Amino acid sequence: MRLFLIFLALLIQPRERIDAMSQPALSSQYLRWFQEIEKSLGALFRLFSGLCGQCYSQTMAQAVSGERAKRGYWCCCVIDNQVHDHWTQLNAVQIRADRQWYQKMKIPKDHPARRRFPGNGPCPALGPQGCQISRCRPITCTTQLCEKMLYVLAEARLISGPIDSPRQIEDIISLPDILPALYGCRKNQAVTAAEVQAYLAALAEFTARLARIDVKQRRLWTDRAITRFMAPERRPR
Ligand code: SF4
Ligand code: SF4
């Protein structure tokens, strides 16, 4: 038995060493700041009043009916796979809290998002209730505003410029993108507490401006965004 345990230890140890060697350097302070910013961004995204839910339902309805909007406008979690696109860094971040994080994500076999979609989706983190990663999601999922969100912000006169492709939040608050450095993706970029505070303050101010708009008005714009970007395309006869 003891020999078996020693053999097992020899088998496991090198794997752990390899894992540790291949993990990008991560700072606990940086990850705390990342989560603080992620939380603030969550407050902003919640103001889009069910937009992502509508987008998902519309995508699945079109996938079943065969009626198609331009597929680039389909639900991003259905057509993208941010988990595998950013696996090295995401895994390094997630295993700090739970080594089994990936194995714990479950999508029932009959879940509609199990079928094949254009692009490399669906994302394996997409569960029946939405994203199964509760903290430190891939950076794109944390900071990107899709065309439908940009439409709402443009209607609210909070942004100007093109809305026909996604933009990063930093383009809007006009501050440097510090999240990749906080996530350990840019080893040579140091981030200071003052930069994090400035980022949080700019986000809070932008969020407050959107929150001041009546919720019914925001819902109207989200409905229009769905119609504008997800109306089925006419196919040539
Ligand atoms: S494409 Fe936009 S609205 Fe649709 S799920 Fe993604 S972020 Fe939400
Ligand atoms: S990680 Fe979550 S939010 Fe990002 S694409 Fe996957 S399911 Fe969507």
Image: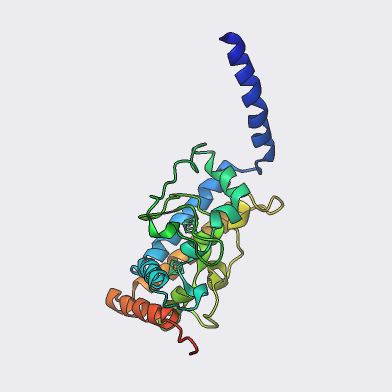
104 left or right of 27?
left
Viewer-closest of 160 and 237: 237
Indicate how the structure is coloured in the image: rainbow
- Vertical order, 225 against 52 (above or below): below
Count how many numbered circles sit on residues in the image. 0
- Residue farthest to the left, as pictured: 216
> What residue lies at 41% left-to-right and 81% top-to-bottom?
231
Residue 91 spot, x, y in % from top left: 57, 45
The one nearer the camera, 74 or 190, is 74
Give how far across and how far down residue 167 sits, in percent.
55, 72
Q: Is residue 93 visible?
A: yes
Q: Residue at x 41, y 68 (%)?
A: 207
Residue in the image at 45% along x and 67% along y: 75
Q: Residue 174's image quarter?
A: bottom right
> Which image quadrant is residue 45 in?
bottom left
One can see residue 199 in this view: no
In the picture, measured across the screen, residue 139 lies left or right of residue 231, that is right
In this picture, is 127 found above or below 72? above
Residue that lies at the very extreme toward the top in this rendered image? 2
The quarter of the image holding the N terminus is top right
Q: Residue furthest bottom?
A: 237
200 vs 122, nearest the viewer = 122
Q: Percent position (x, y) of residue 93?
A: 56, 44
Residue that lies at the very extreme toward the right in this rendered image:
188
The answer to which of 58 and 146 lies nearer the viewer is: 58
Q: Residue at x 44, y 80 (%)?
A: 229
Instruction: Give residue 144's position: percent from left, percent from top.
Output: 52, 66
